[in-house]
Amino acid sequence: MTENMTEKKLLRVAVIGGDGTGPEVTAEAVKVLQAAARLENFEIEFHDFDLGGERYLKTGEILPEEVFQELKTFPAILLGAIGHPDVPPGVLERGLLLELRFRLDQYINLRPVKLYPGVETPLKDKGPNDIDFVVVRENTEDLYTGVGGFLKKGTPDEVAIQTAVFTRKGCERCIRWAFEYTRRRNAKKRLTLVAKTNVLTYGHDLWRRTFQEVAKEYPDIQTDYNHVDACCMWMVKNPEFYDVIVTTNMFGDIITDLAAILQGGMGVAAGGNINPEPGGTSMFEPMGGSAPKYTGKGVINPIAAIAAGGMLLEQAGFASAAAKINRAIQVVTGTKMKSQAAGKMGYSTSQVGDLVVEALGAL
Ligand code: IPM
Ligand code: MN
């Protein structure tokens, strides 16, 4: 049978380049995904979506309903960055990023924390074998729901209330997913719950009880608990202790910035907003922002976006292509790039993309 007669698998990917350097880094991820698809003999169809600060400033639209409905038909979205210096903080974050996470019910925010070879970490005496864990952050509840309000706003007696919402269903589905993920990740099989049960005696009590109940179904997984403040300390002192961390939305947001710096910064840190249900739409993004000061200069690091592309393939069922992208990235960080900082890589943004493509071909 010739290649043409074989039915190739097709993956449809929506691309939201977004603001600032977002489109520059997604372009490199697209390039690498195309190369991986050629190597692994499947096809990817990319569809560009014009969303973000520019569109909002021009038309007032953030996420028009028909665009949302179209995005929902894709199994995966690749997102560059959202954030524009002329748009007040919160407008695009809530209107686009959080809106997509919530409405697409992407209840897992998966953030692998891996120090690639050749990448500098601020931790003294720690290397790639020490910094290799994953944070599973709940992605649809907590302080992020926007429940709250003001009383007597603008007066000296002003009251502001911002409520953290936790549900049994919301924490259970996240905790259960984290157990499953821990089971298949490696031989360590350790899952640490990070919360603040000594102070948040309602919401985090619900988390603790749910974690303990679900743990009974996973006797092969070693479980553990850290208060979030202690976790910040341990993550810096003994990162090698961690395998998988499961945590709440707000704490997950904070500890994954700490973790990102340990793995070499925003140039390399990637994340996935995953809806694991059949037919769900997941969204993958570099953790860095839109970096206005580097925009259009070809100096921003695309590794995080490329790694996000690898995660996308993994979730979409192309595990071997994903693994290859991971290995190619490590060849490039380990043997080519001088630094992971914007403008200091020793290569331009698109040259780094080319290097990953080249490394893929040579694997
Ligand atoms: C992140 C970001 C977002 C968050 C912001 C931009 C709303 O910090 O993805 O971690 O808080 O979740
Ligand atoms: Mn964050």
Image (cartoon, helix red, strand yellow):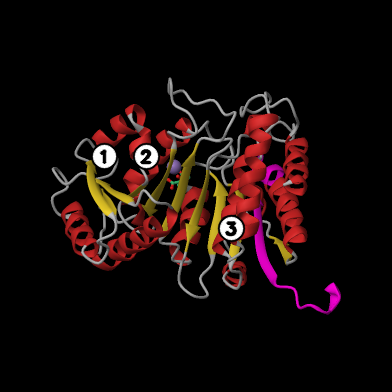
- Where residue 312 is drawn, which disc sits there? 3
Q: Is residue 293 left or right of residue 243?
A: right
Residue 350 drawn above or below residue 182: above
| Label 2 close to label 1 by CB (< 8 Å) | yes
User: In terms of sequence position, does the residue under pointer 2 or pointer 3 come before the other?
Assistant: 2
User: In terms of sequence position, does the residue under pointer 2 or pointer 1 come before the other?
Assistant: 1
Q: Quadrant of ligand 1?
A: top left
Q: Is residue 44 left or right of residue 251?
A: right
Check disc 2 and give the amino acid type: Ile
User: In terms of sequence position, does the residue under pointer 1 or pointer 3 come before the other?
Assistant: 1
Say what secondary structure mark 3 lies in: helix
Highlighted magenta segment, given as a residue range: 1-25
Residue at the location (34% across, 57% down)?
Answer: 145
The one of 322 and 55 positioned closer to us in this rendering: 322
Assess disc 1: are there few (<14), some (14-19) or many (≥20) residues with their C-alpha within 10 Å of its C-alpha: many
Image spot of residue 143 (x, y percent) = 31, 51
- The residue at which mark 2 appears reads as 254
Report the mark closest to the observer, 2 or 3. 3
Image spot of residue 288 (x, y percent) = 55, 39
- The residue at which mark 1 appears reads as 228
Q: CA distance from mark 2 to mark 1?
A: 10 Å
Check disc 3 and give the amino acid type: Leu
The one of 217 and 89 positioned closer to us in this rendering: 217
Check disc 1 and give the amino acid type: Val
Can residue 151 be seen here? The reply is: no
The one of 148 and 248 positioned closer to us in this rendering: 248
Report the mark closest to the observer, 2 or 1. 1
Residue 4 counted in the magenta span: yes
- Where residue 54 is drawn, which disc sits there? none
Q: CA distance from mark 2 to mark 3?
A: 23 Å
Say what secondary structure mark 1 lies in: helix
Can residue 265 be seen here? The reply is: yes
